[in-house]
Amino acid sequence: MKTIAGSNNRILEINLSTQQFHESAIDPRDRELYLGGKGLGLKLLYDRMTPGVDPLGEHNMMALCTGVLMATGAPCSGRFEAVTKSPLTGIMATASCGGPFGMALKTSGWDGLILTGKAAVPTYLVVDSQGVQFKAAAGIWGQDTEAAQEKLLEEGKGAIIIGQAGENLVRFANIRSGHRFLGRGGMGAVLGAKNLKGIVAKGGEVRIAPVFKERFSKINKRLGQSINRNPVTSGSFRYYGTNANVHLSNAAGILPVRNFTGGSHGEAHKVSGETMAEQFKTTWDTCKPCLIKCGHRGTINGQSRPIPEYETVGLLGTNLEIFDPVVISEWNELCGQYGMDTITLGGTLAWAMEATEKGLIQTDLKFGSPQGVSEMIARIALGQGLGKDLAMGSRWASKKYGGEDFAMHVKGMELPAYDPRGAVGQGLAYATANRGGCHLSAYVLALEAFFGMADPHALRWKPYMVKFFEDVYAAVNSLHICHFTAFAVELEPLLIKLSPTFVVKILNQNLSPLALNLMDLSFWPELWHAILGKRYIPYLSMLKFRKAGERVHVLERYMNTREGISKKDDTLPRRLLTEGRRCDSAQHTVPLAPMLEKYYKIRGFDADGIPTARTLQRLGIAVK
Amino acid sequence: MQIPDNYEFLIYPKIVSGQCALENLPTELDGNNAQKPLVITSQAVVRNGLTKILVKAFYDSAVVIGAIYDPVLDYAGISQAQQAARLFLERGCDAIVALGGGPVVALAKAVNVLVSERQETLQPYYNGAAIAGPLKPLIVVPSGASDGQEAMPAMTVDNRAITSEKLFPGVFVLDGRVTVGESPQAVAESGAIALTQAVTALTMEAPNPMIDALAHPSLGLLAQHLLPAVRRPKDKGAGLAVANAAVLASAAGANSGPGLLFVLGEALAEATGVSLGKCLGILLPVALDTLGQSNRPVRDALCLAMAGLEGFAATPANERSNKGLELAAALARELKVALPASLQALRVQHHLLDPVAQAAAAKSGGRFQAAECRAILGQAWEANA
């Protein structure tokens, strides 16, 4: 087997309309500036796609990119990124997945692929080191993700696949790979619109080896030790999954209840990770390679099923006032088979329940009752009746039927399961996240609500914290490595580990730039440098890594502004700006305006939220 | 002037206008047998300190404010209407004062229906039930931001329109301290809406002298005061004149019905999330130019309103149609100092133009064709300043 030192640097460009493909090389400068994964995917589309294309039209493109860390054996690095224009939001969408397709694509000799055009008939692709074969998908079109994926895996080691939701252009249809998903933004509908059921990569054709093997091995070992020391990555997430957050969110008053009208609930413990682990005798079912092992399976009603993630429990559970883990896991399974994002689905169902309550639509849906939910999920996936309207997401449905003030989305993407009225920095992060309502753009709430390292209601320095984490996570998604390694990378270095929490809190609140700049993030850039054989300069290389993240974030923002995004879109659902909650005696809302103004200034955006020419020039982004 | 064989006209609101008109508010309430109003307003109005001016107006009166409901943003929905209705009942209020424009007034009308008709939701009215009435007294104190619907017998709540003569507000109190604009952009947006309504009323094919009687002074005020108000939003005189023009144009619009431009603007605003005022500010000059280039003459009344008596008299009769359109288009184009020049500059995505044109045609109930809507949108997309 051929061994490649560093990275393949090959991109496969596929035109589905003409059934032709060609290879292109990754520009070394783009590799330096955008790292890989998300950053590279965005840059590839920035160079190729014109603004204003219809997300479901043939001119929309999708980039599937791996990072430098993929297939090297770095911990938690089995992730790849998809980038496209979202049919849910109408702006750029990026999504990360830990399924086996990334590894198979990389070991087929490709760093990424770009899809454009539209196949004349349902098609699937088989990718190997020589290129791609276009095959008729008539036999699997209409099948759910599980059955169709099984068929595709006869021809390779990793696949991506859409279900009926993608075929029916549900705007929040996702893409499955193994048991993991490219979840958000309607990636599945983009493939469905292209008549593409899936892609299978042969894999196992090349081996990737770091250039500086010894150095890589040392860093790898140290990072593994950190992951195994950290109480989140080696404790709560490893044993209870992301669902361990239910107790934390409930205690902090940020667990969404009844369409974000409440922030905690006495029955929340019934759907916590701890309860599910005990009730369903869970075992690990993770991305590969992974040390954290947050993905779990369990025996539910005699069947082996994936345990729902925290976001699914929050949005399909507590936010609908459902506290039955069996019911939630059934809906989770159903969504997995149809290929639908559980966050947007949950947010849309909660909107539908409240709209029913307020007389705007007529359905059987009711908070606290599972009646009719399974049927509605099916109707949404298959585009039947009212399901066809709900399949467009809560923004679209609320424009048609009313109830915009309780449609809980940002830029058309439904909010994750953290209520920012209990962590206002997260509110700013939601408002400014490039793809819409997203907690992964900057996970500030962990400091605010979980670790006690920042005052959840203080405004000072929150814009700086949001910018810092946006830049860091954009870089992490470009390496590409799991976000959860951040707990080990950021919190395990001695300086922060030995500092009492109240000291960190005071520093964060009063000298946030200093505190954040002292944060040692060196594991990530050190891995990247060792694999590619580049010289690592302590601290300076880390700053360069953060600047690459900033570049990726600003490029994405700039691409979105070309699609019409500006300050008017950087906002939150009206409920979060104007309504207090029963669980909060101080009746906090999110004071967004002052934070947003400061955020624009430190980001180098103008007053309307558009990156200035100077900012773009500083980051080396060519204006188009 | 010709009187048509048949026409209909309905006007209701009493207008009280002046630099200190707000001081008349307690008297107006008293005249409507109301002693404890619920004030509905927006966060922007509170931020600008206008609620303080309103509260001071009650200092020397026996009328007391029952409560102030102020979390309204840019949307009127049943959720907030229910909250405000609960507040109204809990505090034993007997009238409603809407302090602000657009969604504030729509919400006030919705609350009025809920409390007067003892309803929990507006569902019966969405399904076609008539508002029985009578409703509680509703007094509107408009701010500098208007959506053109304030003086109409209609409300748009949760993006759905309910029309009923019962929804006419009883009194409009226009006070120069309240009608000052928040920014040049806000004044330009309100002005673009009023201009669209007034021009539509004066160019409608079936003339109606009563509608003309409202649209004419409205256009006259806009021609004279709109640009000064845009340049100096804090100018109380200009702001009050524009607010008067907006109320008159809205009342005229209530009788003339929405024209092509208004329907198109609403469809565009709905699809893009951009405000109606911005959309109309871009569409209006394009539509007027198109109308001028067509061979379809418009009535001389537009020229008279825009050019004034002397300008009208100095224009040969066969040129008045074009002159009126040119002057209106020029005024609309002047708003570009505060508004984007084209849909492209507004970053509206080109692929949305076709669906917007179709939505507008559908919304008009077949009165307008998708093709003519699309043509205007196409020109507006690449219009130059």
Image (cartoon, coloured by chain):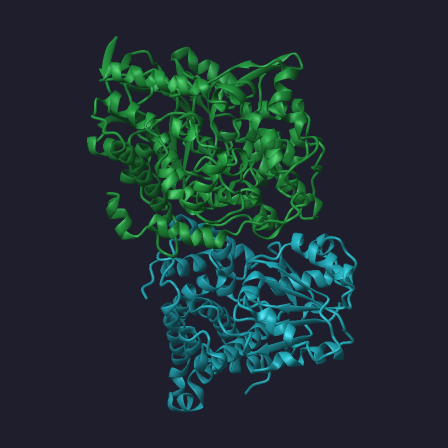
Front in this rendered view, residue A378 or A44: A44
Residue situated in front as seen by the camera: B201 or B366:
B201
Who's the residue at 25% across and 46% down the image? Answer: A618
Q: Colour of chain B?
A: cyan
Residue at horizontal 39%, vertical 26%?
Answer: A494
> Relative to residue A323, is residue A434 depicted above or below?
below
Residue B42 coordinates in the image, percent (x, y) = 59, 62
Residue B242 horizontal/vertical position (percent): 50, 77
Whether residue A66 appears in this view of the structure is: no
Q: Is residue A150 visible?
A: yes
- Compared to residue A584, the image places residue A220 above or below, namely above
Q: Is residue A494 left or right of residue A327?
A: left
Q: Toward the viewer: A41 or B199?
A: A41
Q: Quadrant of the N terminus of chain A?
A: top left
Q: Classify residue A111 as left or right of residue A429.
A: left
Residue occupying image coordinates x 36% and y 69%: B337
Q: Is residue A205 left or right of residue A594?
A: left
Considering every residue shown, the one lying at the far top of the view is A1
How many labels were placed on the picture? 0
Q: Image height check: is B20 above or below A177?
A: below
Relative vertical location of residue A359 with respect to residue A123 in this rendering, above or below: below
| Residue A470, x across and y down, in percent | 39, 39
Chain letter, colour green in render: A
The percent coordinates of residue A98 (x first, y second) are 43, 22
